Image (cartoon, grey):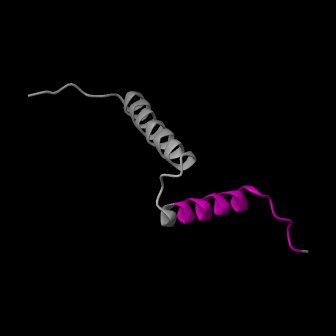
Amino acid sequence: MTAPVISRDQAIRNLRRVLDAARDRRDRDRAAGRLDPEVELILRRLEREQREQATPRPLAA
């Protein structure tokens, strides 16, 4: 009773493909103005937080 096993690398590739497709759909809907205003606000907040995390902050002296 053995079933075919998907390798870890293949599973990651499959996940990335599905995630990228979902992001593409979201971006197209966003560009066309089809997102709910609440969702748009959430996306903007998440993007702002990501930018803040990526910006190096000076160390306190």
Q: Is residue 5 left or right of residue 30?
A: left
Q: Position of residue 58 (x, y in %)?
A: 86, 65
- Prevailing secondary structure class for the magenta stretch in the rendered image: helix
Report how many numbered discs are placed on residues in the image: 0
Residue 48 image position (x, y, % from top left): 67, 62
Above or below: residue 32 compared with residue 55: above
- Seen as rendered, the residue at the extreme right is 61
Quadrant of the rendered image containing residue 10: top left
Q: Which residues are magenta?
A: 40-60
**Was residue 61 drawn as part of the magenta stretch in this picture?**
no
Q: Which residue is nearer to you in this view: 5 or 43?
A: 43
- The reply, left or right, for residue 20 in relation to residue 60 is left
Image point (71%, 57%), residue name:
51
**Is 47 on the left-hand or right-hand side of 58?**
left
**Horizontal and vertical percent position of residue 46:** 59, 61
Q: Residue at x 54, y 60 (%)?
A: 40
Which residue, as the protein is rendered here, is positioned at the far top? 4
User: Does the magenta portion include 49?
Assistant: yes
